[in-house]
């Protein structure tokens, strides 16, 4: 401070320093997130307010699920980081932080964070009757992904498996069953912790030629010179598609004469084989058919065709014994 007269200003006094009164702090700066110890935790950090408008006495960090009515508060202190644990996977949260001085609380700074979700855009493409290619995109996450696991399950059969953990975002599943519907899921791995799987996608492998024959072949000689054939369809996993018919191959055993009868549809009691030689041994084999072709034939089964009225005896010759008899 200096005094003044009409002649001018005198010397100033020695300076005296005094801090102005504190006020509410401004907002914290640079709110940031980093991965926690696992997929259900996150570390939030920030920089002090600038200007602080006083001495920062503590920080308050809170979080809630987006849409929830109230926040969960973390312990208050002057540290610039907090760890939030126990989060739910594939869920969006709001996280907010504010600073305090002795005067009171400053404004909140809020950001949104989503915990680890499933891989995105999971797609499957059939490459062959026994091979499917699966592709996907990484989930949106700040957590380091160490790999992916692909799981597949057959709907109609007890065929399931898992592709060992891979690091790229596509894989081929080989050795599948033909013409079978599979459900496929993918989940990300995070150093021993698994993230959530996608909603299962469904895909059917292509059909193929039947890889197994009909079974339980039975033959019955019915009407004269006819042979009735019955059989069961191949087991489901060997049909490799919708069956469209059967091929019956029958051979006369004594001569080796081979003939073929085609049966349309999926009837397992076809019309009897007709036009045979009565009461003669025939060997019969049956194969299933689908749109891809004819499958394997069954092992041959033998049976006698139906009996018929006998032919007339053959007169071989006569010998006169005496005047009144012959043989």
Image: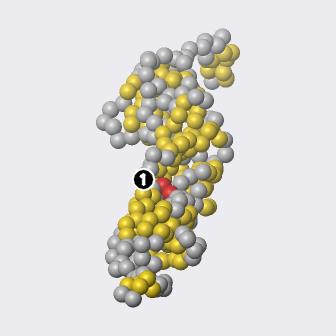
Q: Nearest the camera: 265 or 228?
A: 228
- 7 vs 303, nearest the viewer: 303
In which image quadrant can residue 304 be found? Answer: bottom left
Residue 211 position in % (x across, y down):
55, 60
Tell me the crowding category of disc 1: few under 14, some 14 to 19, or many 20 or more residues within 10 angstroms, Cα based. Answer: few
Q: Quadrant of the C terminus?
A: bottom left
At numbered mark 1, what does the secondary structure look like: helix, strand or loop?
Answer: loop
Residue occupied by mark 1: 156
Specify whether residue 41 is in view: yes
Taking the image as shown, residue 274 lies to the left or right of residue 164, namely: left
Query: Which residue occupies the foreground of this view, 250 or 293?
Result: 250
In the rendered view, would you say 141 is above or below 37?
below
What residue is shown at x 54% (from left), y 30% (from top)? 193
Q: Which quarter of the rendered picture does the N terminus lie within?
A: top right
Please identify the residue farthest to the bottom as the structure is shown.
323
Of residue 44 and residue 232, the one placed in the foreground of this image is 232
Residue at the front extreme of this rendering: 323
User: How far across and down, in percent of the image, does residue 247 sit?
Assistant: 50, 72
Does 244 sit above or below residue 188? below
Identity of the residue drawn at 31% across and 36% down: 69
> Residue 259, percent across and down?
53, 77
Q: Residue furthest left?
A: 69
Measuring from the top left, give residue 213's x and y in whole percent.
51, 61
Residue 267 horizontal side relative to residue 301, left or right: left
């Amino acid at each position: 401070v200096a005094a003044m007269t009409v002649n001018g200003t005198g010397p100033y006094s020695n300076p005296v320093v005094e801090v102005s009164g504190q006020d509410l702090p401004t907002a914290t700066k640079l709110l940031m997130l980093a991965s926690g110890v696992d997929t259900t935790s996150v570390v939030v950090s920030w920089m002090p307010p600038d200007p602080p408008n006083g001495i920062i006495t503590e920080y308050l960090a809170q979080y809630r699920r987006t849409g929830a009515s109230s926040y969960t508060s973390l312990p208050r202190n002057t540290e610039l980081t907090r760890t939030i644990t126990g989060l739910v996977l594939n869920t969006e949260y709001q996280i907010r932080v504010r600073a305090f001085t002795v005067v009171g609380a400053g404004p909140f700074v809020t950001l949104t964070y989503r915990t680890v979700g499933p891989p995105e855009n999971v797609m499957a493409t059939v490459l062959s009757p026994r091979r499917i290619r699966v592709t996907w995109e990484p989930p949106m996450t700040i957590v380091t992904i160490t790999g992916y696991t692909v799981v597949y399950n057959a709907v109609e059969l007890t065929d399931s498996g898992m592709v060992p953990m891979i690091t790229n975002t596509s894989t081929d599943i080989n050795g599948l069953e033909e013409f079978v519907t599979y459900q496929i899921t993918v989940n990300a791995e995070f150093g021993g912790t698994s993230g959530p799987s996608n909603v299962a996608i469904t895909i059917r492998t292509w059909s193929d030629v039947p890889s197994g024959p009909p079974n339980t072949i039975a033959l019955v000689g019915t009407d004269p010179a006819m042979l009735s054939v019955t059989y069961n369809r191949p087991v489901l996993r060997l049909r490799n598609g919708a069956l469209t018919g059967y091929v019956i191959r029958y051979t006369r055993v004594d001569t080796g004469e081979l003939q073929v009868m085609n049966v349309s549809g999926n009837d397992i009691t076809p019309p009897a084989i007709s036009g045979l030689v009565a009461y003669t041994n025939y060997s019969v084999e049956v194969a299933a058919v689908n749109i891809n072709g004819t499958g394997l034939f069954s092992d041959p089964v033998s049976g006698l065709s139906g009996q018929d009225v006998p032919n007339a005896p053959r007169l071989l010759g006569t010998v006169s014994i005496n005047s009144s008899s012959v043989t």
